[in-house]
Image (cartoon, grey):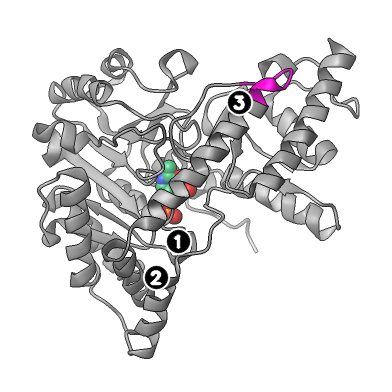
Amino acid sequence: MNTPVLNKYLASARPSATYKVMDRVAALRAADVEVISLCAGEPDFDTPLHIRAAAMAAINNGHTRYTQVAGLKALREAVADKFRRENGLNVQWTDTLVCSGGKQVIFNALAATLNEGDEVIIPAPYWVSYPEIVQLCGGKSIVLPCGPGSGFKLTAAQLAAAITPQTRWLILNSPSNPSGAVYQRAELQALAEVLLANPQVLVLSDDIYEHLLFDGQVFHTLAQVEARLQPRILTMNGVSKSYAMTGWRIGYATGPRWLLDAMEKLQGQQTSGACSISQHAALAALTGPQDFISRSRGVFENRRDMMVRLLNEMPGLSCIKPTGAFYAFACCEALLGKRSPAGKLLQTDEDVAIALLTEASVAVVHGSAFGLGPYLRIAYALDDASLRKACAAIRTFCNTVMATNG
Ligand SMILES: Cc1ncc(COP(=O)(O)O)c(C=O)c1O
């Protein structure tokens, strides 16, 4: 057989860096090595009972058939109600779309709109999938490094300098994976001013971590902050992180009708409607008791406090206090150029992450996988005892690296 030919966009896309680390963890565990994984992008809680019960009732009541491509009307009404209630957006159920995960919302949106050479502005550090989805859709990622000086956030000046006539999209994610950074209202307003002057730019607002917001902050989304931009914003959310439902695969969005129609058309030839049972579960999540959200937020906030304190006590690591999501983004620059306890030269943040895994049995993801090094993304979606144990192992590792090479 001739060399297999792949689609040119797929051929140059990279597999998810986080899945790659998770594969390494699985291989070590298969060899009976005990590894603490701080690389999961999902809450460690079970889906609340009433949501699971709704799914079981859906099965038993025969809701096991295809649904409308755009989602069950009842769920779309609940989604519209959520956007009105929590985000102050003037949304009717017909202005919504339900997809198989937030990831499919993003894929649908970019695949429906990007043409060869179209540019997508992505502030870094970014969620690993954004540039890869852009690549798969034939677009060009314009990555803008946003370091600790701006709290890992895009500034209006950076945005203004990056926009060209080819700019089709800006992707905003707050609270952010991987930095935990949260955009304040004034920061969004400043970005909005730039966007108002550039009518060719659409905005994808990835609000998936909306409810994981600490220190009593109030969540702001761009469409609410600047209503004049609403016809150009796709506001995306989902049940994965808020309700511990990552495996159920339900995401949703609101945005301009022409865009939702195009996304629905694409989805209709791809996955069709999302899983009927998961849609019933998501309906229960959005319309049922909401106390799970504040409980999980409280747990994550306590863990955030503990992790930031422990990480900042370690020689060689430093960490800004994140105000959302469940990640710490720790700078590991001071470890570079030194040797690991086993004698490996640590030249990059990936070297540090690999040495931590193989020598300290703690899995984290290197920041450069998210477009900004030298950092380590440390997910604290794990019980306190395991987090303490992981931190003790990281501390021993750092102590040795700094003492032997310092
Ligand atoms: C920033 C961000 N956006 C979107 C998603 C997609 O979530 P899902 O497809 O589970 O809804 C994730 C998942 O890790 C994420 O971290």
Instruction: Look at mark 2 in the image and give the residue it sits on.
Output: 51
Lower sequence index among marks 1 and 3? 1
Q: Note whether ligand 1 is within 8 Å of mark 1.
A: no
Q: Amino acid at mark 1?
A: Met
Q: Is residue 333 left or right of residue 202?
A: right
- Is disc 2 placed on a helix, strand or loop? helix
Lower sequence index among marks 1 and 2? 2
The answer for how far apart the CA atoms under marks 1 and 3 are is: 27 Å
Task: Specify the label residue 113 is tagged with.
Answer: none
- Is disc 1 placed on a helix, strand or loop? loop
Q: Which segment is the magenta one?
A: 311-318
Residue 104 forms part of the magenta stretch: no
Q: Residues within 10 Å of mark 2 (few under 14, many from 20)?
A: many
Answer yes or no: do the residues labelled 1 and 3 have beta carbons within 8 Å?
A: no
Answer yes or no: do the residues labelled 1 and 2 have beta carbons within 8 Å?
A: yes
- Say whether residue 269 is visible: no
